[in-house]
Amino acid sequence: MENDGTRKEDNTITEDEKSAIRILESTINHTGERYEIGLPWKLPANLQNNYFSALNQLNSLNKQLNNDPKLSDMYQQTLVIDLEKNYVKPVEMADPPPEKIWYLPYHPVQSANKPNKVRRVANAASKFKGESLNSNLLTGPDLLKSLIGILVRFREKPIAILADIEGMFMQIGIRNEDQSALRFLWSIDNDVRQLQFTRFIFGATCSPSCAIFVLNRCAEDNVETYPKAQSAIKSYFYMDDYIQSFESPENANATAFDVKNCLRAGGFGLTKFLSNHQQALQCITPEDLEEPKSETRVLGQKWNLEKDTFFMKSLGEFPKEAEQYTQRKLFSLVSSIFDPIGFLGPMTIRSLNKTSNEVQTVFVIGKCKVAPVKQLSVPKLELEASVTATVFNLIYRAKKQRDNHHQHTVEDIELSKSYLIQMSQVNSFPTVIELLKSNHELDPKFKHRSLNPMLDKNDLNTNTFLNAYRRFTSRKCQPADLYSDNGKTFVGAKEELKSCLNDLDKDKIHKALAAQNTKWHFNPPYGPHFGGAWERLIQSVKRTLLIILGSRKFTFDVFHTIMVEAEAMMNSRPLTNVSDAMENEETLTPNHFLLQRPYNSLPPCIFPSTKPANMKSWKNVQQFLNHIWRRLAREYLPTLIKQPKWTENAGNSLKVNDVVWILKDSTPRGIWPLGRVEEVFPGRDGNNRVVKVKTAHGTFVRPVSGLARVFAD
C-alpha cells in the first residue's frame, strides 16, 4: 500500500535529488537542543539583493493594514510570537551584507473557519530579475509517505492514536551562513526594520524534504533509547501528523511514549494526542492531550471516534434552494468532498463463503477514474494494458484452476482488450444492442445510426468449428491430412474429435469409417510463416475483400455468395499442365482434388465497370464479384512472379518452354489462360522485354510485364 502508483521508487532518484541528499547529510548537526541543517542550494546560486523590491511590497501591505486595524493588530502579534520563540532575529542595518542575501515578501492569510486567527505567509516564489528563492533551492527527494497507505493502515487495527508536531518546520534550525537568504522587512512605529529567520519556513520548496529528513534522522539517532519510535516515525507520519493503530492499549501506550520522547530529544514537541480508547494515552501528560471530542479529522477525512468509522458530510447539510447555488458555489461544493480511499465510488461486491451460510466482506479501498483531459503517454497506456491483462489473466486462470504464476502473453492482452471494448459498448449502448439482437430497426435519432452498427457474432469455438469442418467434408471430401495453426479453437477441436472417434470405435462402427480418420498437423504457436503456401493465398483473398467490400453491410445470403465464389476463383487456379500440347486447355487445379473434376461455373455476365450502388439485386452481386476477380488477379499475380535480385531483370527469368499465365483486364472471371513460351526477344540492353507465347487459340507476342510463370520446363 505504500506505493499507490503515483510515487517514485528509489531507483528513479534524480541527480538533483542526489545532490540535495549529499548537502543534507554533510550539513546536519544536533546543537544539543535541536537539529540544524543547511539549505540545499543549486550551484551556482544566483540571488541578487532585492531590498528595494521588498520595500515596495511592504509599503503596499502597510496600506492594506492601515485600512483594517483589527487585521493589523493580529498580524503584528505574529511577529511578537516568533521573536519570543527565537524563530526570527533582528538584523542591524549597518551590518555588512553577506554573500547570499534575499528579502522575502510577506502577507497575512486568514481562514473562513478561523476568522480570529491570522498567519504570516512568505512568498518564496516571488521573483526579482527573473530569480526567486525557490528557483535557487533544490526541492530534495520526495520522502512523504503515501496518504492512502497511512489511512488504510490507520483502519487496520481497533485502537487508534492521533497527534501532531507543533510548528514542525520552525523546530529545525538553519545554519548561520544560510540565514541571510531568509530576511524580511517589517514596519515598527513607522520605521523599517530588518529581520531574518533562524528556522525553516513554510513556503520554501525544500522545507518538506528537509523536515522529513531530520525527523527520520532523529528516529535513527535515538533508536537504542526509544526502540519503538523508529518504525512509528518512519512509517506512520504524514508530514507533521502522527497516525497509527494498535491491537492493544498497552502497545499503544508504549509506542506513544517512545515516539513523544524521541522527538523531544530532537527538539520537536508532539502534542494534541487523541484516541478512541481511554486507556491508550495514559503515558501522555494532560497538557499534551487534545480536548475530548466525538468527531475529528484524519488527513482530511472525518472520523467518528465513538463508532470508529469514517463518514462524509450528508447531502442534508447543504442548502436545498436552487437559487442559492451559482456555478462557482457548485464547483466549490464538489471540490470540498475529499474521498482519497474511495468510499463514495460506485462498486459491486460479490462474496461467497463455501464453508457456511455466512458472508463477510470488508471494504479496503476503491478507485474511480474518468477520461483524462490530457492524452496519456504511450508508457502509461502500455502499463494500463499490462495491468489489465494481468488482472483478467488471473481471473481466467482462477476459474480454470490453472497456475497463476506466469507472464501474460499477447493472447492475454488481446483477450483483455476485447473484453474491455465489449463491456464499454454494453454500458454505453444497452438499448442499441437489444434492438440489434431482436433484429429491430434503430431509432432514426440515434447519432451513430449512419455507421450501420451491427453485432459481431464471431463466436467461433470448438463446436462451431467442428460443424464447419463437417460441412466442408460433406461438400468436398474427407482429407487424409489437415494442416492448421495452433489456435485454441483448433487444439480443442482435435481433442474433441479424437474423443468422438474413439467413442465411435468403441461402438464398433464399421472399420471403413475408422480408416478415414484425418491426421491433424499443427504449426508452432505464432508461426504463420510455417503455413506459407496457404497463408499467401489467404492474405491475397483477405486483402482483396477488405479493399473491395470495405465497410459495406451485407445480408448473410449475399456475403455467403461472395465467399463461395471467391473460394471457387482461387481453387480454379492452375497448378500444372496435363500435357505438353497447349491445344489441350485442361490443367490441374485444386478443384480437381477437391471435386474430382474441373470447376465448371456458370458463365459470368458482362456489366459496366463502375461499382454497384447497392447489394440487393443478383446483377449487382455479380458485378461486384467481377471487381473482386480483377483485384484478386492483381493481388495473386505478384506472388507467382519470382523476385530476382536487384541486379537482375524480371524478364530474364522467363525461358523457352516455360508455362505462363496471361493476365488481361478483360479476362472473364474464373478463367486462367495459359501459354507456353516459344521464343524470347531481348531488348537493346540485353534484357528480355517481349516473348512469343503459344496458346490454345494461337501464337501471340506479349510483353513480359503481363505474364507470370506458373511452372518452368
Image (cartoon, rainbow, N blue to C red):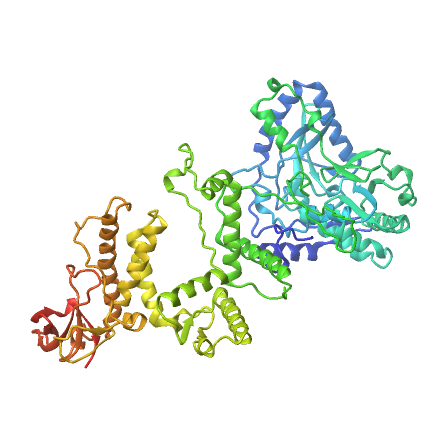
- Residue 592 can be seen in this image: yes
Please report the residue visible at 91 percent of the width from the left and 50 percent of the height from the top: 250
- Residue 381 can be seen in this image: no
Location of residue 611 in the rendering, given as x and y in whole percent from the top left corner:
22, 48
Name the image quarter holding residue 595.
bottom left
Seen from the viewer's position, the closer of residues 704 and 207 is: 704
> Is 402 left, or right, of 378 in this rendering?
right
Location of residue 492 in the rendering, given as x and y in whole percent from the top left corner:
52, 67
> Is 130 left, or right, of 170 in this rendering?
left
Seen from the viewer's position, the closer of residues 76 and 412 is: 412
Name the image quarter holding residue 112.
top right
Q: Quadrant of the C terminus?
A: bottom left
Please report the residue visible at 25 percent of the width from the left and 44 percent of the height from the top: 613
Please report the residue visible at 52 percent of the width from the left and 68 percent of the height from the top: 496
Residue 569's place in the image compared with 605, above or below, is below
Please report the residue visible at 68 percent of the width from the left and 19 percent of the height from the top: 68
